[in-house]
Image (cartoon, grey):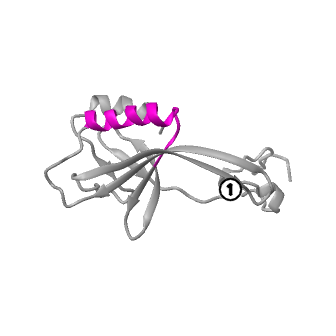
């Protein structure tokens, strides 16, 4: 989900909810403690130099039950971040504390923002000799061109 899509969604909401991949909601007294731009400059295992940029939201649960984050407040934080940090319309990555800091993608279901799982991957499979995964087919899915039927004269 891109930053512009988050802003559109926030304009339509009266309350903000974040849902974890297991279906649980982040406690309603969460805070967005950071909005930033993260730049990752790296070299992959195939020797290609890469740059990735994402907008990062950090969610934090405090024992402060009286100060809930409202959509207009988060919009103000985002707009200030865009100006001060020169943030463009990038994909969102969310950090959330569980057993350790987890990194999630972000989606929206019309009511809640959904924290989506992220996976590691090899970006240079062709250089590493990792074959592409072949699709698994069922024999019943394979079309048969010349079907023999009893009395059809093909045998």
Foreground residue among 30 and 124? 30
Instruction: Provide the residue designation for mark 1.
Output: 137
What SS does tag 1 mark?
A: loop
Between 146 and 67, the one lying in front of the other is 67
**75 in the magenta segment:** yes
Left or right of 65? Residue 101 is right
In the rendered image, the residue lying farthest to the bottom is: 99
Q: Is residue 42 magenta?
A: no
Quadrant into which the C terminus falls: bottom right
- What residue range appears in magenta? 71-93
Q: Nearer the viewer, residue 33 or 23?
A: 33
**Could you tell me residue 3's position as x and y percent?**
45, 35
71 up-or-down from 52: above or below: above
Name the residue rendered at 18%, 56% in the picture. Answer: 64
Q: How many marks?
A: 1
Residue at 48%, 56% (x, y): give it: 117
Q: Nearer the viewer, residue 109 or 94?
A: 94
Question: Which percent across, then down, holds residue 59?
Answer: 35, 53
User: Is residue 54 found left or right of 8 in the rendered image?
Assistant: right
Q: Position of residue 69 (x, y in %)?
A: 24, 44
């Amino acid at each position: 989900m891109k930053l512009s899509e988050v802003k559109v969604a926030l304009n339509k909401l009266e309350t903000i909810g974040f849902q974890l991949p297991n279906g649980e909601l982040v406690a309603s007294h969460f805070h967005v403690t950071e909005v930033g731009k993260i730049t990752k400059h790296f070299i992959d295992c195939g020797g290609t130099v890469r740059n990735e940029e994402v907008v990062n939201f950090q969610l934090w649960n405090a024992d402060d039950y009286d100060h809930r984050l409202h959509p207009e407040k988060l919009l103000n934080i985002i707009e200030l971040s865009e100006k001060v940090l020169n943030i463009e319309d990038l994909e969102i990555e969310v950090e959330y504390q569980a057993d350790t800091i987890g990194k999630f993608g972000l989606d929206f279901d019309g009511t809640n923002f959904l924290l989506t799982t992220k996976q590691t991957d090899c970006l240079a499979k062709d250089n590493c000799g990792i074959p592409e995964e072949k699709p698994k087919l069922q024999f019943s899915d394979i079309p048969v061109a010349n079907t023999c039927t009893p009395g059809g004269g093909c045998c």
